[in-house]
Amino acid sequence: MNPIIHRALSLWAEPVPVDDALALDRFASVYADPVTVNGAASPLAELVRRARMVQGAFSALHHELVADVDGGDRCAFAFRLSGRHTGTLETPLGPVTATGRELTVTGMDTFLLRDGLVVEIWALADMLGLLIAAGALTPTP
């Protein structure tokens, strides 16, 4: 496994420092600023904000690496991010208030690396499965 995968997953699962400068420094040890996410430039401050939102929505947050491929300057990995849903979660369909349920989102990321940093990310996450598990959506037969 490319060590940057472990470092990236840890940033999202371990508490983000309250101090903005320290949080940005930690993210800058993994990601370029800005980093391209799904084709759009994203400043590190936005990644820090997203990580704080995820960590505010889940307690006992942890990740599981399911599979990974290392191709030198490119790597890809599949993961599960799980925790107890204890805070509001921002989603593409709007906020989902805490349910108290143990929820898991499955995702896959590909990284383009340059000079030891992630400069480009293509990311997919099973938000539909997460929203159904949270009770925010009900599938119809």
Image: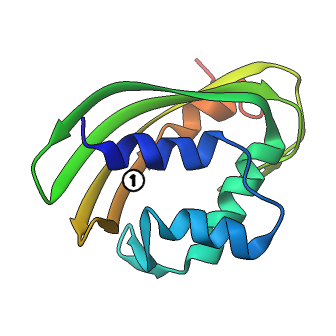
Work out whether residue 55 or residue 22 is closer to the camera in this orientation and state it.
22
Say left or right for 18 vs 10. Answer: right
Observer able to see residue 134: no
Say left or right for 130 vs 98. Answer: left
In percent of width and height, residue 115 lies at 24, 72
Q: Return the residue at label 1.
A: 123
Image height check: is 135 above or below 40?
above
Q: Quadrant of residue 96?
A: top right
In percent of width and height, residue 5 lies at 36, 44
Work out whether residue 33 or residue 120 is closer to the camera in this orientation and state it.
33
In percent of width and height, residue 50 lies at 67, 60
* Outermost residue to the left: 71
Q: Quadrant of residue 43?
A: bottom right
Residue at position x 10%, y 48% from top? Answer: 71
Image height check: is 77 above or below 65?
below
Mark 1 falls on what kind of element? strand
